[in-house]
Amino acid sequence: MLILVGGLGAAALLARPAPPPMLTDADLKYLQDAEHFGGFVLGDRALPLLAEALRDDDRETLVAYFSESFEGRLFDNNSGKSTTYPFATFRSWTEDTAAGEPTGRDEFVETLLAYRREFDKTPSVTWKVMQMQPITRGQLDGPWEGSLKLRLAGDRVDGGLAERVIKFRCRITSIHDKTPEEDGWLASCTAFRAQYATGKTRLMEDITERTGIDVGRLHDTWNHSESPQKPTITGGVYLSDYNQDGRLDLLLTDVSGHQLYRGEGGGRFSDVTLEMGIDPKAVGIRAVFADFDNDGFEDLLIGETIYRNDGGRKFVVLEPGRDTSLTLGQCTAFSVVDFDRDGKLDLYAVGLPQPMTGHVGWLGDNDIDRNQLWRNTGDWKFEDVTEASNAKGNGAWTFAAVWFDANSDGWPDMMTACELGMNAFLVNNGDGTFREVDLPDGFGGFSMGITVGDFDNDGRPDPYVANMYSKAGERIVANLRTDAYDRRIDAKIRDFVTGSELYHNQGDGTFRRLGRTIGVSDVGWAYGPTYVDLNNDGLVDLYAPVGFQSITPGRPDG
């Protein structure tokens, strides 16, 4: 028997909101069936047949997959925006570009085959499902609608290389287990975004064998397939001119052993790991080069080991408590900054584990990690100012952090990339402390890496956050009932399947989200992005590696 004491207590209990609705068994079954038909039957069984027919220039087989009443719309080849560089020409079409006039099945197929015939030999041709759901929710046996992505790439007939990517909004007459064996299931395709690139040569080539870098010593999961625990992150790549000879040097950290290579010029490197005093088996794979003692030579941290650069001649291990007050623990990443502008580089370590005090989840607050800010006071003395500066972070599982002046006040601010929980954005108050500021409209987590650069050359740095993304995840969430969860939770769930995000700096500490608008969101399960001007045109380009663990030996996992 429940006895309520006091009218206020009873009223408060009765007024308590009902628990949020949860997914029922019927909901779960519907999501499973929708992904089975939209993702597996259409995506993994039917679309490869469509791609094969297009690749083989097989008009008879290709046209059979289109319904007799098919209606398609493609962009005019001469519309869109064209940009020419010394190495390639790009043409792009966005949702602001009007698609061409509607065409029937035969004309649409002939245009696709014309795209195919631009290529010599056998090009790579893929059709992928992006989104797919029944037009009427719950009616799995009725028509479906969603989006598809077509990609053709390879050598051109007239020489050089080409790649064409088209995203379509589409309608499917029906999807069931026999669909791949049937004709006429593709009812409509309307292009809403496209890219076409041509070039004489590839932008980059693999020169590893000519460099002297021994990648054979690096950990390869497929050579350790018997191990029940396969590391998901096996090492990193770090650049520095540690000896100030004007040539970049290279550090490879790896669970199989670290390697330091001295740049010799001409793209050649020499292994100087032992010669320079680096312990190949030093614990940890996180590293950073930075001149902590202001002698003009960059020092080095690897895991929990601290190296002082002795004039480019040797790296000398410093003993915590004896040679330095800096003590390093297990962490996810380092970043360096002169946060108080005193002329000495400070150290920020992120992702230090701490005892969990409650539930851990993708959404909401977590308390599983902490970050640590070490203020450099000179002569290898450091002060832990994490609490005093309010730089601890929000408890989310943090993968990386970048420093940049977000609001143009001359003080470095900081943003993190967090997998579990929301990303943190800390604004520097200029007095040794930080205040946390919300990022614009959205969840802002599910992140695995972050970089910052001025992509539009407006003088303001723009962060790019690499997030986990899969087409399957976006499809499943799109088929989720909008009232299955609390409105705020539903918004967060739908936000964290949108992919990576580019935050356009507005100059006052606020940002506008551009990831989807400019086409850099759905790149895959992203890690470690970076801005770099690959073609020396004065504009930074974006390199965003993706992947988790290889599924097939000999193939990249991205």
Image (cartoon, rainbow, N blue to C red):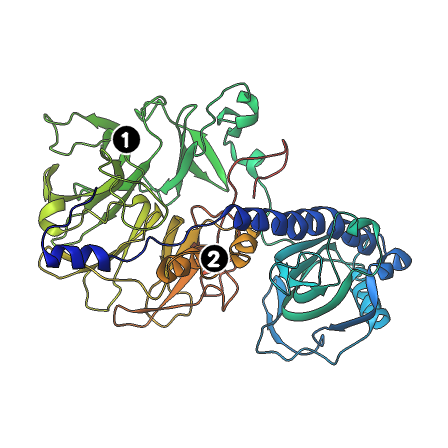
Closer to us: 36 or 75: 36
294 above or below 531? Answer: above
Mark 2 — residue? 542
Q: Quick one: which residue is furthest to the top in this view? A: 226
Closer to us: 461 or 26: 26
Mark 1 — residue? 313
Element type where label 1 sits in the image: loop
At 33% from the left and 70% from the top, the residue drawn is 459
Asked if residue 532 can be seen in this view, the reply is no
At 55% from the left and 37% from the top, the residue drawn is 208
Q: Is residue 474 shown left or right of residue 245?
A: right
Marks 1 & 2, CB-CB < 8 Å contact: no
Q: Is residue 462 shown left or right of residue 105?
A: left
220 above or below 2? Answer: above
Point out residue 138 in the picture as x, y percentages from the top left corner. 61, 58
How many numbered marks have been drawn onto this rendered protein structure? 2
Q: Quick one: which residue is furthest to the right in this view? A: 60
Closer to us: 267 or 323: 323
Q: Quick one: which residue is furthest to the front in this view? A: 1
Image-quadrant location for residue 150 = bottom right
* Nearest-to-viewer mark from 1 and 2: 2
Q: Is residue 157 shown left or right of residue 194?
A: right
Amino acid tagged 2? Leu
Q: Measure the alpha-carbon separation of dots 1 and 2.
A: 35 Å
